[in-house]
Image (cartoon, helix red, strand yellow):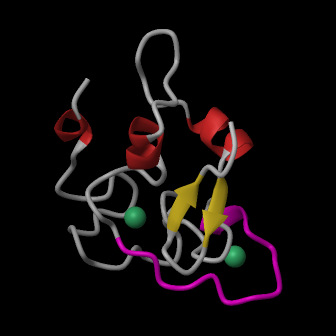
Amino acid sequence: MSMEAYFSDTCPSCNAAVGRKHDRMCDVARCLKTGLQRNSCNAAHRCGGDRWDGYWSGLQDCLIFDLTTDTGFPDLNRLYAEATWDPSSRRWRITER
Ligand SMILES: [Zn+2]
Ligand SMILES: [Zn+2]
């Protein structure tokens, strides 16, 4: 499936438009330090103001790295297991496979 199929004008949780920050309660917003869900981040840092970029967090990276389920859907569990979040580029990276 192409990436465009997953594009959404607004965040499915808080309705933020593309390029806008998620609201404080949004459960789609990711922590910019860990790449994981901001709502469930309890670390002693500022998680940062993540913005909606049109895609579910990590989804583009799944497709780039070809981490998909048997049915071709982006597999976020594999992304979290196999990739490392790079806070400076705000992207997931895979160094070895
Ligand atoms: Zn949101
Ligand atoms: Zn955090």
User: Position of 54 compared to 63: left or right?
Assistant: left
Q: Is residue 24 above or below residue 97?
A: below
Q: Is residue 49 above or below residue 68?
A: below
Q: Residue furthest front?
A: 96
Residue numbers of the magenta segment: 38-51
**Magenta stretch contains residue 63:** no
Location of the N terminus by quadrant is: top left
The percent coordinates of residue 28 (x first, y second) are: 48, 57
**Magenta stretch contains residue 49:** yes
Q: Residue at x 17, y 56 (%)?
A: 9
Q: Is residue 36 above or below residue 41?
A: above
Q: What secondary structure is the magenta-colored segment mainly?
A: loop
Q: Is residue 65 visible?
A: yes
For residue 84, what is the image quadrant? bottom right
Q: Residue at x 26, y 57 (%)?
A: 54
For residue 86, what is the image quadrant? bottom right
Tally of numbered tags? 0
User: Position of 60 compared to 47: left or right?
Assistant: left
User: Position of 21 compared to 29: left or right?
Assistant: left
The percent coordinates of residue 67 (x first, y second) are: 52, 30
